[in-house]
Image (tube, coloured by chain):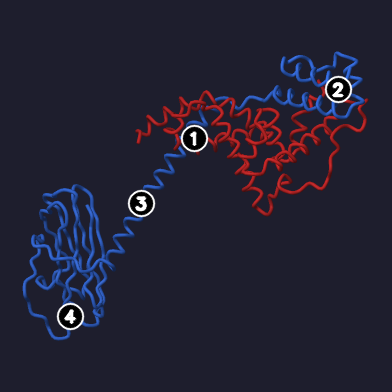
Amino acid sequence: MNCSDIRQRINDEIRHDKPLLTHDEAVVQHIRHCDLCRSLYTDAVLTRELREMPVPEPRADFAARAIQNAVKMNRMKRIKSLVGISAAAMLILAAGLVFTRGLPDFAGRPGLAPNAGLTAPGRMEKTVRVMIETRQSRQNATLAIDLTENVALKNFPGHRQLTWQTELTQGRNLLELPLVFDDDAEGYVNIRYRYNGNEQQVRIPVRAEKEHEPQTTITS
Amino acid sequence: MKRPTAQAEIFEALLTPHIPALYKTAYRLTGSGDKAEDLVQELLVKLYPKTDEMQTIEALGPWLKKALYRLFVDELRKIARRPEGRLGGFQEEIETVKASSDNPEKMAEIAQIREKLQDALNILDPQHRSVVVMHLAEGYTLKEIAAIYNAPAETIKTQLRRAKARLKKYLKM
């Protein structure tokens, strides 16, 4: 029996899933003394045994648990991602305090009408503009303003808090707040917008040295 | 985008029939039931967002196997990048293992080989073990394995030769 015969037998027996040659003494003798045929034979044995190697069963209900966990973990990732988006939206809102400037006045501004008034010597006036953007018109939206002690609304001296209801049109609504404060004062105006149980608020710092009038946008 | 519940149901229907085969391959790759479960679990987590894509794949079984291999390879690379977790599979082996037993008269019986095969696989480092499993047990060509590993086919061929030599030596073949 030569090498060619042996290789043919190996291939044939592997293909037909027969016992590998150990039943044939002539083949066994050849393999023992021929390095190349022995290598092919042992490769064939390894291949077959690996393919047939028994694998212990996974734990009971592993498949169902694995599927459930995969779904659950992905849902948690999604929730985290949404939280991330909300946080990003808040940052954009905050960034708007600094960067949105030069917005045009809105003729139909709600509620507050800035009237001419007297400003005492040593006091400054600045107008804070807040853009409220709504996807649809809002009846009876509530606006509220909180002011620190050293900041006042020009037309409402002595009022620290103001709350009123107004109608917002679809799109942009500009709220102008003429503020009066001392030259060296630092304070803030807190603006809250409520509609249908949801509330958004923004706090705007007010400083005498500011050159530009701060403006911001609330999106609803 | 599908409703989350609908997506979960589709995902379950698509994947459940393949989990036993994936686990079996994962077991061969990792050599442990716990690690095999972890690997399959991680694969499912990564696949869930691809539910829509998987619905369009005709031969999902082989596609999933390749995804499993890629994940396994990625995991190996992550471990290899950690200074404390460097694996032998990514180091050049200095040792040259002889291709067959020194003494052919002592060739092991097939029954003995069968008994020791899992132990023999476990002495291989994960990289070599995965190449052996992919090629010998699962029937992937060297070219296909090279593509999965993003490595030259020659490298895979060398790894396979060394791995087989170590297995045969351990099994006294």
- Mark 3: secondary structure: helix
Of marks 4 and 3, which one's residue comes earlier in the chain? 3
B49 or B104, which lies in front? Answer: B104
User: Where's residue A6, x and y in %?
Assistant: 84, 19
Q: In this view, does A169 lie above or below B160?
A: below
Q: Mark 4 lies on which chain?
A: A
Rendering colour (chain B): red
Q: Name the residue beneath numbered marker 4.
A: A124
Pointer 2: what residue? A3
Q: In this rendering, do the residues under marks 4 and 3 share a single chain? A: yes
**Crowd rating for badge 4 (residues with CA inside 10 Å; few <14, some 14–19, many 20+):** some
Give chain A's shade. blue
Residue A85, label in figure: 3
Residue B159, quarter of picture? top right
Q: Mark 1 points at which residue?
A: A69
> Could you say whether the residue bearing mark 4 is in a helix, strand or loop?
strand
Chain hosting mark 2: A
Q: Are the two marked residues, 2 and 3, in contact with CB atoms closer than 8 angstroms? A: no
Q: Residue at x 43, y 42 (%)?
A: A76
Is disc 1 placed on a helix, strand or loop?
Answer: helix
